[in-house]
Image (spheres, helix red, strand yellow):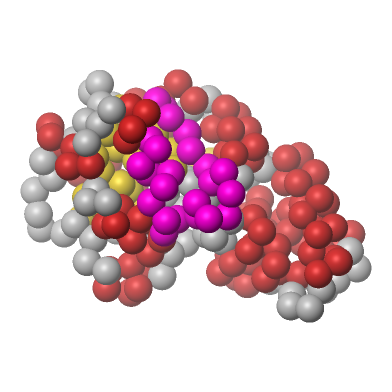
Amino acid sequence: MMQQEFEHKQMELILFDLDGTLIDSKVDIANAVNLTLGDLGLPQRTLEEIFSFVGDGVKQLLRLSVGEGKAAQYEEALRIFRTHYLAHCLDNTEFYPKIGDLLSHLDGRQCAVVTNKTLEYTLQIIQGLGAAVHFSAIESPRDSSELKPDPGMLLRVLEALNVPADRTLMVGDSTNDVRAAQAIGVKVCAVGYGYGNQAKVTALCPDFYCETPEDLFRMIVG
């Protein structure tokens, strides 16, 4: 963790990315992608390939997985993936260690999810993990223009909950999270245990950096 005191009492709101920050969902995502590719008669991808595609929304995930120049199959992939992922999105997905405890020990501070994941999938996972009670807001993109690093979703949460940017912390694993927070003056804590490229994330100079979920718990809860 960066050697900078976390002034937790000043933070009224904590925004969390979902995949790679709160939950480890990559195996279920990859399995649903490969089930989709199999239905389309396309070659399976390695888990590592699919993991590298995660972070910019389901459309980009499937566009990269299907491959360039396959527009017709890409549209069909969107439909097929939805069925597979909704059926399997909780097979292996779970909170990272200490994250459940963190959400239960926020001492009255509000928290929200701000994710590039489709809202339908996001809600099913959060509700399936019994975590909906912890969040004052859950935001996913309403269209592709709102994908982080665009800060629109963050701004919508701040407005809805009436919390200023300087009383808000964003926690995420990717450059998208860091850039979105920095664009509107929200302090940001990057985490090193998720799916993001650590070198690229730290190059953006986030305010805080936590290598492990346990570090994040200690920083926020104490």
Q: Is residue 126 magenta?
A: no
Residue 164 versus residue 59 in the image, above or below: above
Residue 135 versus residue 122 in the image, above or below: above
Q: Tell me the quarter of the picture where residue 157 sits.
A: top left
Figure quadrant of the C terminus? top left
Q: Residue 141 location, x and y as percent?
A: 54, 46
Extreme residue toward the bottom, this view: 69
Q: Residue 91 location, x and y as percent?
A: 67, 42
Residue at the (45%, 21%) spot, across then down: 133
Residue at the (35%, 73%) spot, across then down: 200
The answer to whether residue 136 is left or right of residue 9 is right
Q: Is residue 141 magenta?
A: yes
Q: Residue 116 location, x and y as percent?
A: 52, 50
Residue 149 versus residue 15 in the image, above or below: below
Q: Tell me the quarter of the picture where residue 61 sits.
A: bottom right
For residue 209, say whether it is visible: no
Residue at the (50%, 51%) spot, across then down: 146
Figure quadrant of the N terminus? bottom left
Q: Which residues are magenta?
A: 135-157
Q: How many marks?
A: 0
For residue 107, say whether it is visible: yes
The answer to whether residue 1 is left or right of residue 198 is left
Pick the front one: 81 or 146? 146
Q: Tell me the quarter of the picture where residue 57 sits.
A: bottom right
Q: Residue 50 location, x and y as percent?
A: 64, 66
Residue 101 versus residue 143 in the image, above or below: above
The answer to whether residue 101 is left or right of residue 13 is right
Pick the front one: 219 or 203? 203
Residue at the (63%, 63%) spot, across then down: 60
